[in-house]
Image (cartoon, rainbow, N blue to C red):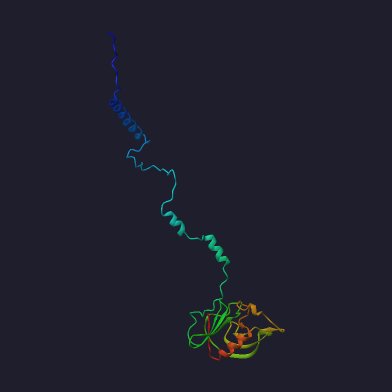
Amino acid sequence: MARHRAQVRPRYGRIALVGGSLLITLVAVLGGVGVLPVDGPDTLPASASVAPATPSAPASSSTSRTTAPATSPTSSAGEAADAAPSVADTTLPAASGTGRRVVFDRSRQRVWLVRADGTVASTYLVSGSVSDNLDAGRYAVFSRSQDAVGIDDSGTMRWFVRFTRGPSGAAIGFHTIPIDEGRRVQTIAELGTPQSHGCIRQRDTDAKRLWDFAPLGTRVVVL
């Protein structure tokens, strides 16, 4: 009688059980050495630093780029360098007092003729002293001459309005640009810069305007 070998069927259940045990063991070993996370599939160890595989900007980054300033410090400096120079400041100094007065600002080399109500009748550039012989303060016109001669025959001038004296005793006041040997001792274009030996030089029309504005006793404010 012929023998027949019994058909052996694979034990799938046992294989699955063994495979599952091996997988769990492998995960535990890899997690213990730090290869795999041990806190769950969606967390990383606190010390881990992983860059995203595909860098992408956050949703708000496009907004921040569009609202960023269009200019840089370099371009701003360039724009400032190309800007037109500002016009000379003609504003009456705030600390010049009140009432009718003549104001002379040494730092700005400018004169203001101020009416009693505080409005400015005229303002213009002058040339004051190259030396420090006139102190800031309040003065008053004490002498006037339509024509005068400078110390040591240093030239002739007109519309001389005196309001104080310098260290040497010589009078200091407002007058035209002196004329020496038939020529002005400075140009009109140089008004606005110190040029004199003590007085305040003005163009002819401005000197005549101050002469008419400042009789004896008129207050003079030097800043």
Q: Is residue 204 left or right of residue 70?
A: right
Q: Position of residue 138 (x, y in %)?
A: 51, 84
Q: Quadrant of residue 37?
A: top left
Is residue 159 in sight in this rendering?
A: yes
User: Viewer-proximal residue, 131 or 7?
Assistant: 7
Q: Is residue 31 left or right of residue 161?
A: left
Check the image and name the residue furthest to the top. 1
Q: Position of residue 142 (x, y in %)?
A: 56, 90
Q: Is residue 60 left or right of residue 171?
A: left
User: Viewer-proximal residue, 12 or 188?
Assistant: 12
| Mark count | 0
Q: Is residue 196 left or right of residue 32?
A: right
User: Viewer-proximal residue, 148 or 193?
Assistant: 193
Residue at position x 29%, y 28% in the image:
17
Q: Position of residue 171 (x, y in %)?
A: 60, 86
The answer to whether 26 is drawn above or below residue 45 in the figure is: above
Is residue 171 in sight in this rendering?
A: no
User: Viewer-proximal residue, 38 or 166?
Assistant: 38
Q: Position of residue 82 (x, y in %)?
A: 58, 66
- The quarter of the rendered structure image containing the N terminus is top left
The answer to whether 161 is drawn above or below residue 81 in the figure is: below
The answer to whether 140 is drawn above or below residue 60 in the figure is: below
Check the image and name the residue furthest to the right. 181
